Amino acid sequence: MHLPVAVIGAGPFGLSTAAHLRALGIPVRVFGDPMVSWRDHMPAGMLLKSTPAATNIDAPQRGHTLVDFCDAAGIPRLVKDDDIIPIETFIAYGDWFQQRLVPELERVRVVSVDRRGSVGPGSASVGFELKLSSGELFTARAVVVATGLSGLAHLPPELAGAAPDGPSPVGPVSHASQHHDLSRFSGKDLMVVGAGQSALETAALATEAGARVRVVVRGRGSVGFGTPPWEQPRFRPQSPFGRAWSLWALCYYPHPYRYLPAQLRHYLVRHVLGPLGAWWLRDRFEGKAEITEVARIIRADAPDRRPVLTVRTDDGRTRQLSADHVIAGTGYRVDIAAMDFLSPELCTELAVSRGTPKLGAGYCSSVPGLYFTGLPAAASYGPVMRFVCGTQFASPRLARHLAASDL
Ligand SMILES: Cc1cc2nc3c(=O)[nH]c(=O)nc-3n(C[C@H](O)[C@H](O)[C@H](O)COP(=O)(O)OP(=O)(O)OC[C@H]3O[C@@H](n4cnc5c(N)ncnc54)[C@H](O)[C@@H]3O)c2cc1C
C-alpha cells in the first residue's frame, strides 16, 4: 500500500520523526507551522535551559546537529555545557533543519482524524481519514501526533475565577505561553505564579523590561536554581541534563519506563528536572523580582478587571495580593480531550492513563497505526520526552516500528 504517513506537527519532534520516516523511504505528509511554539509561545530574548549537547534535533544522517547549523550559519559554535543558546538561534536551527530534511512541509492545520474503518470482517484496518484546514480530505496509512505543547497550557482551577473565559493576555490572568513580548508590562505591577524555568525566566525578562514583578510560589524555599556545569560532581555519569545516575538512566534507557507503576511514571514526569531555574538565571532573578511564598492560593478574583489572589500563608493567615496582571507560569498538562482534532470515536478507543495515551513498543498507541511522540509520550517513555534531546531516542524507534508494521 502506498498511502502516506501523516505527521501532525512541525516542532522538533515532528520534523525529526518525518526526517527518519523519509530516510526509510516511507511516503510522508507533514503538517504544521514550523517551530511555532518557540516563535510565538515563548518570550523573545529567552535563553534555552538545555545545554548544546542536549539540543540536537535528531536526524537520520550526519550533518544536522546544532553545531552543524552554527557552521552553516557562520555563527560561533555552541558546544560547551556553559554555552547558552538564545531562542532565536534555536528557531533558526529548526527552520534550517526543516528546509533541508522536510522541505515538503505543508503549513496547514489538521482539523480532524478519524479511522477509515475496515474493508470486511477480519480484514486489517485501512488507515485514517484526515481533514485539513484547506478543506482537503485524504487517507493516511498511519498518523504520528507530534503536536507538542499546542493546546495543553495548564491554568490551575484556583486561578480560573479571575479568568472565567479562559486566560488571556488582555484579561486579568494569562498563561506564560500567551506572551512573546514582555515589554508591554513596563511600569506595571506583574504577578507571576510558579517556580519553574518558564515562570522564573518570564519574571526576569519582565523586570528587565521595566515591570515590578512579584513571583508567587507554593512552599518555603521552592525557588531554586541548577548547579553550574563546573560545580557538578565529576564521578557521576554525564547526561544531557547534568551529572546524575538517575538522569543518565532516564535519558539513555527509557525503554523500561512504561513498565513502571502508573503513579510513579506520572510523578517522575512532573518532578524530574523541575521546577528549577537554570544556573545562569540566578543573577538575573535574585534581588530583582520579589518572591512571595504561600502555603496555597485559595482563589483569584478580578474586581474591576484587576486580579486579586487570596492566599493562605505558612502561618495559616489569609492574605490578598493584587497586581495589574497575573501570568500563570504553571506549565502544560497532557490531555487527550484537548486534542480536539482526534475524533470522539478514536478517543474512546484509545487506552489512556490520566488523560495521556498509553503507548507500547515504538510509540504506538492502543489504536494500531496511531503514534504519539514528544510531550504526549512522556508518561510512557519518561521525562526525556519533554525535551528536544528526546528526539534521539524516539524518532528512529518510531520510524522503524512503523516501517516494520503491517499497516
Ligand atoms: C518556556 C519553555 C522553555 C523550554 N525550554 C526548553 C529547552 O531549553 N530545551 C528543551 O529541550 N526543551 C525546552 N522546552 C520544551 C520544548 O518546548 C519541547 O521539548 C519541544 O518544543 C517539543 O517539541 P514538539 O515538536 O513536540 O512540539 P512543539 O514544538 O510544541 O510543536 C508543535 C507543532 O504542532 C503543530 N500543530 C499543533 N496542532 C496541530 C494541528 N491540529 N495540525 C497541524 N499541526 C499542528 C504546531 O504547528 C507545531 O508545529 C521548553 C518549553 C517551554 C514552554
Image (cartoon, rainbow, N blue to C red):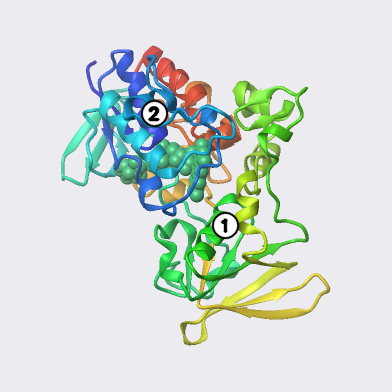
Label 1: few (<14), some (14–19) or many (≥20) C-alpha neighbours in 10 Å: many
Q: Between disc 2 and disc 1, whose residue precedes?
A: 2
What residue lies at 47% left-to-right and 87% top-to-bottom?
304
The quadrant the C terminus occupies is top left
Q: Nearer the viewer, residue 268 or 387?
A: 387
Please, what secondary structure does the residue beneath circle 1 have?
helix
Q: Nearer the viewer, residue 7 or 220?
A: 220
In percent of width and height, residue 236 lies at: 75, 24
Q: Is residue 235 left or right of residue 14?
A: right
Residue 286 higher or lower than 387, as above or below: below
Quarter of the image holding residue 380? Answer: top right
Reading the image, the residue beneath label 2 is: 70
In percent of width and height, residue 354 lies at: 58, 45
Quarter of the image holding residue 218? Answer: bottom right
Q: Is residue 80 left or right of residue 237?
A: left
In percent of width and height, residue 56 lies at: 46, 27
* Amino acid at dot 2: Cys
Residue 120 higher or lower than 383, as above or below: above
Quarter of the image holding residue 157? Answer: bottom right
Reading the image, the residue beneath label 1 is: 199
Label 2: few (<14), some (14–19) or many (≥20) C-alpha neighbours in 10 Å: some
Examine the rendering and report whether any part of residue 123 can be seen: no
Which dot, 2 or 1, sits closer to the camera? 2
Q: Nearer the viewer, residue 209 or 188?
A: 209
Q: Quadrant of ligand 1?
A: top left
What distance separates the C-alpha of mark 2 from that of mark 1? 29 Å
Residue 334 higher or lower than 105, as above or below: below
